[in-house]
Structure formats: C-alpha cells, structure tokens
Amino acid sequence: MGISGARQGTCSLPDPELRARVAACYAGARPFARGYVRHKLRLDPVHAALLELAGPRGFGEVLDLGCGRGQTGVLLLLAGAARRVHGIERNRAWLAEANAAAAPLGFVATLADLATMPALPPADTVLLIDVLYQFETPAQIALLGAAAAAARRRVVIRSMDATAGLRGALTRFGETALRHLWPGSRRRINPLPITRLTSAFAAAGWTITVTSCAAAMAPANMLIVAERTGAAATALL
Ligand SMILES: C[S@@+](CC[C@H](N)C(=O)[O-])C[C@H]1O[C@@H](n2cnc3c(N)ncnc32)[C@H](O)[C@@H]1O
C-alpha cells in the first residue's frame, strides 16, 4: 500500500466559476442547504481531490453511497468527470434536495438504508465519502464488501485516521460536535483503523493509495483509493 503526499491546504475547489455553477443548481433549495453547499465546496478539500483523481478519463458511472445533498455528484457531472451518478441516501429531505439539484444532469436518487442493502447496483466508481465511520464495525466491513463487489474500477473512501494522535483526536472531536449540532446527521462516530479498511482490498490484489485529505477542522481525514488491477479486475472481494 502506498501512502503518498498530503493534500492539506491545497484542495478546496479552486475554480470559482465551477463552484458557482454547482451552487446555482441549488438555487431552489432552502437557504440552509444553499449555504451548506457553498461553504462545503469552498472549504472541503475532497472535491478538488476527486476531480484530480477522475482525471481526463473520468469516473464513468458513479455510485455515491450516503450522498447527502448530492453536491459531489453535481460537481462531477458538471465537470464532465462522471457520466451518470446514482446517489443512495437514507435522509429523505437531503435526498430530495440532491434530486432537485441534480436530476436534470443525470443523477438518479434512491432512498435506502445502506445497512440493510445486501447488494449494491454496479458502477465504475463507488464513493464512500465520510460515511463508513457512522456504521457499527461489522456493518462497515459488510458495506466495504458490497462496494467492492459493485465497483468495476475503483472504490474511493474518505475516513478519518483515528490512530493519528492529536490530529485523530481533533477530527473525532469535530465529528462528535457536528453530531450534537445536527442530531440525525451522524448515528455514531466509529472510525476503524485505515489498514482495517484497506486489508480486504489488498488481500484481493487491488492497488491501494492513501493520501491525506485534511481540512483545518478534520486534520486526520484520509482519502483511500482502491483500484482493480490485473486479476483483481475479475475477482471480486
Ligand atoms: C457526513 S455525511 C456525508 C455526505 C456526503 N457523502 C458528502 O460527502 O457530502 C454522511 C451521509 O451518510 C448518510 N448515511 C449515514 N448512514 C447511512 C445509511 N445507513 N444509509 C444511507 N445513508 C446513510 C447520512 O444521512 C449523510 O447524508
């Protein structure tokens, strides 16, 4: 497993025109949702990291698990980095906001609890951004297996490295604070060690990279990219 350079401080979405185009898709949403999307795009390094990862080839068909309000899918579609995005989300109001913003772009919305889905629909790229740590440990392992089985090319995960000393403690503290601020937004904060998340992929021969994808409020956030290579391209986890 390669752990490459940090992204911290370089990765808020730098293109103001693209940020404005994503925000414009939420023009009909509630003021809180509009503000949330604007700030999220400006402050969270994950968006630029995903666009960089998608590269000129793009992500193809994307399955965005726990898509929330769907701003990541909107961004990928507007940037031409995804052909289609299927978002699965258990929060009915957030999914409705995602659907209203993104359906005209090719976004498909499914209201479902990922903890009760035995299998996931296939996609080229499966995203699990800030979702896994909200599940109990066996459910995280099951969801990783389902994501791997669904992914034709890659699985992209962001989770926090809770073993990262002070950075890990600060990130966990921030997530716990958000949980209290927005009851219902996070059921639990249960980050597994990054190696626990990558081990099944590694054992199945996938190529794994782990990079820092940190922001000031979440300094231990890591981006894990697991890609099928060689024999793993046909052998599912
Ligand atoms: C921290 S938010 C991240 C949202 C989105 N991935 C993003 O990057 O903006 C976590 C999301 O996962 C969703 N989620 C958590 N547990 C879920 C479950 N069991 N089934 C479906 N969605 C779930 C939450 O409702 C929330 O929208």
Image (tube, helix red, strand yellow):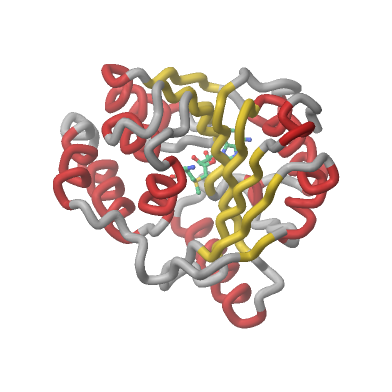
Q: Measuring 38% from the left and 49% from the top, which residue is drawn there?
A: 47
39, 151: nearer the viewer: 151
Up-down relation of residue 124 to residue 175 (above or below): above
Determine which quarter of the picture holds residue 230: top right
Which quadrant holds the N terminus?
Answer: bottom right
Q: Position of residue 132 (x, y in %)?
A: 64, 46
Q: Position of residue 70 (x, y in %)?
A: 39, 34
Up-down relation of residue 12 to residue 123 (above or below): below
Residue 24: tell me if it is visible.
Answer: yes
Q: Measuring 68% from the left and 51% from the top, which residue is drawn there?
A: 208
Q: Position of residue 194 (x, y in %)?
A: 71, 59
Q: Position of residue 131 (x, y in %)?
A: 58, 45
Residue 93: tell me if it is visible.
Answer: no
Determine which quarter of the picture holds residue 148: top right
204, 149: nearer the viewer: 204
94, 155: nearer the viewer: 155
Up-down relation of residue 187 to residue 148 (above or below): below
Q: Measuring 65% from the left and 57% from the top, which residue is drawn there?
A: 189
